Image: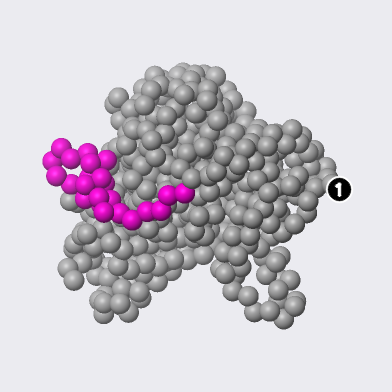
């Protein structure tokens, strides 16, 4: 095998750091991962930089071991590297490269005042997760470190900087830091000027340079190679694609970068990305970001998806051990998800709120997971599981209704990826009931973000002159892709709508819980 004809994609997700190596036919040939979890420290959702470094190296080391076992090869080089991570958040550095504040992740809902004021100033929705909201909130809070900021980036931008020494990022990732003008493929000049007038800070001096898909984001330095692979096997000089966020890699991995296509990523959080075919109005529930090649994308992002389901499955697993049963956790997930299919379409009167953290779409700064029922509700295992699956999608549905009904956004095809869709049919059917269109899952969907990042690296290396990213994916990556498509029944759709009506009506319970607990 010629390793110069492979591409390494890495993604730092919310619960796993994952890496995949693909060949020139875009097939995964080796992989590695590392599990980790965010922590709530002094009211801030964060990951320590030590855990970032440790986890990244462990993940790459696992991939090296997989490559060695499968092919007898040492990972000395690759054709290209690409790094992705959770979008948004806040990582400020001074002129000497010293980190000035803890890494504040997308999960934080502590920037409400800043987000509201910037949205009004720009006439453009600025969600709480965005880097510019975190920066302005730090200014409003009078935080001392702000005056020392020389560089502000995201987690993906930080890793790219460590690997290459370059302060750059892909346009899709940049669109989660500050609004992008899709005509220029750069930060919106008018909004940059408004922020300068407001604060006196010229963001062009502190934000990463924006690059489109296909551009080279630099090369792996000697220090970068040792950062990624302390063992010294990996050689410097490898081209590095512009880093991207998990939204951009999800779009790429599901071939959803063309106008009127969309995808839903559902794991710890869930979000829908729809490539828009016309300008949209300003909605607090809708983010406007971009594809990796700069097209405008309407994004409905929800902080909470599967965490509450995971907690309940852990409880069932503990009960099984109490009864002396050795139950495989993956099998338990599968059986419980399948059980939901036999539940009543409206969940029999059971209601669940999956809010581990705050939720911007429903205007909640904090979360408290809730499960409630009336005495007359039909409390069965199938209804219980279905309620939790529908709860995982309910907030997403609220945002999607704004897109499809208020803004008349049309969707030709919708792809699902992430852990929610791991059990065949179940997650697809629930999502189809929510959005009212068929939902497809590709065979490669399990590879997820790192696969999408590897494909962006492949596009940088192997696209022909003038070949767009959508054409490259259609013709060279997904032409013969295998996928399964599931459509909800009308009964499923009506049941979801009935569940959502009750969910909306009882939402004050969730707000009360955050006040009382």
Give residue 60's quadrant in the image: bottom left
Q: Residue at x 60, y 65 (%)?
A: 335
Rendered residue at 67%/65% (across/down)? 314
Q: Which of 474 and 8 lies nearest the eye of the viewer?
A: 474
Residue toward you, 117 or 409? 409
Give the residues in magenta: 463-486
Q: Alpha-carbon neighbours of circle 1 within 10 Å: few (<14), some, or many (≥20)? A: few
The percent position of residue 505, horizontal first and vertical second, equals 74, 33
Which quarter of the figure has residue 384?
Answer: bottom right
Q: Residue at x 70, y 53 (%)?
A: 383
Closest to the observer, 102 or 36: 36
> Element at badge 1?
loop
Q: Is residue 124 visible?
A: no
Dividing the picture into quadrants, the one containing residue 154 is: top left
Q: Quadrant of the N terminus?
A: bottom left
Q: Is residue 207 left or right of residue 490?
A: left
**Against 464, is 201 above or below?**
above
225 over 426 or under it: above or below: below
């Amino acid at each position: 095998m010629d390793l110069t004809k492979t591409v390494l994609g890495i993604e730092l997700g919310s619960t796993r750091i994952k890496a995949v190596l693909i060949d020139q036919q875009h097939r995964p040939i080796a992989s590695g991962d590392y599990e980790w979890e965010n922590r709530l420290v002094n009211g801030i959702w964060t990951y320590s930089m030590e855990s970032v470094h440790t986890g990244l190296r462990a993940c790459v080391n696992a991939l090296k071991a997989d490559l060695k076992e499968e092919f007898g090869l040492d990972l000395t080089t690759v054709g290209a590297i690409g790094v992705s991570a959770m979008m948004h958040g806040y990582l400020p550095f001074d002129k000497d490269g010293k980190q000035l504040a803890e890494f504040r992740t997308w999960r934080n809902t502590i920037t409400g005042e800043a987000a509201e004021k910037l949205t009004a100033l720009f006439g453009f929705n600025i969600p709480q997760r965005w880097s510019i909201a975190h920066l302005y909130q730090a200014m409003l809070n009078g935080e001392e470190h702000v005056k020392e900021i020389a560089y502000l980036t995201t987690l993906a931008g930080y890793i790219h900087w460590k690997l290459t020494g370059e302060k750059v990022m892909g346009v899709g990732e940049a669109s989660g830091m500050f609004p992008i003008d899709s005509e220029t493929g750069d930060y919106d000049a008018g909004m940059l000027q408004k922020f300068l007038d407001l604060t006196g800070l010229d963001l062009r001096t502190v934000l990463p340079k924006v690059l489109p898909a296909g551009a080279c984001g630099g090369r792996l330095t000697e220090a970068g190679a040792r950062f990624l692979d302390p063992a010294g096997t990996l050689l410097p000089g490898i081209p590095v694609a512009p880093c991207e966020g998990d939204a951009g890699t999800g779009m790429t991995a599901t071939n959803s970068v063309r106008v009127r296509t969309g995808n839903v990523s559902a794991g710890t959080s869930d979000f829908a990305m729809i490539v828009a075919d016309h300008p949209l109005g300003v909605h607090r529930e809708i983010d406007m970001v971009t594809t990796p090649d700069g097209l405008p994308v309407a994004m409905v992002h929800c902080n909470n998806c599967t965490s509450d389901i995971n907690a309940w499955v852990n409880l069932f697993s503990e009960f099984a051990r109490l009864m002396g049963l050795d139950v495989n956790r993956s099998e338990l997930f599968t059986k419980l998800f399948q059980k939901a299919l036999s539940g009543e379409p409206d969940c029999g009167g059971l209601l669940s709120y999956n809010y581990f953290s705050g939720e911007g779409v429903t205007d909640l700064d904090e979360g408290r997971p809730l499960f409630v029922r009336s005495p007359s509700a039909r409390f069965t295992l199938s209804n219980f599981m279905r309620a939790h699956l529908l709860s995982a999608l309910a907030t997403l549905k609220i945002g999607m209704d704004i897109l499809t009904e208020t803004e008349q956004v049309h969707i030709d095809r919708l792809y699902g990826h992430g852990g929610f869709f791991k059990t065949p049919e179940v997650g697809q059917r629930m999502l189809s009931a929510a959005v009212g269109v068929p939902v497809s899952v590709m065979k490669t969907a399990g590879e997820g973000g790192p696969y999408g990042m590897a494909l962006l690296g492949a596009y940088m290396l192997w696209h022909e002159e003038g070949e767009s990213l959508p054409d490259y994916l259609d013709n060279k990556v997904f032409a013969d892709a295998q996928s399964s498509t599931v459509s909800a029944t009308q009964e499923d759709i009506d049941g979801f709508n009935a569940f959502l009506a009750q969910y909306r009506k009882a939402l004050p319970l969730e707000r009360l819980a955050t006040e009382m607990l």
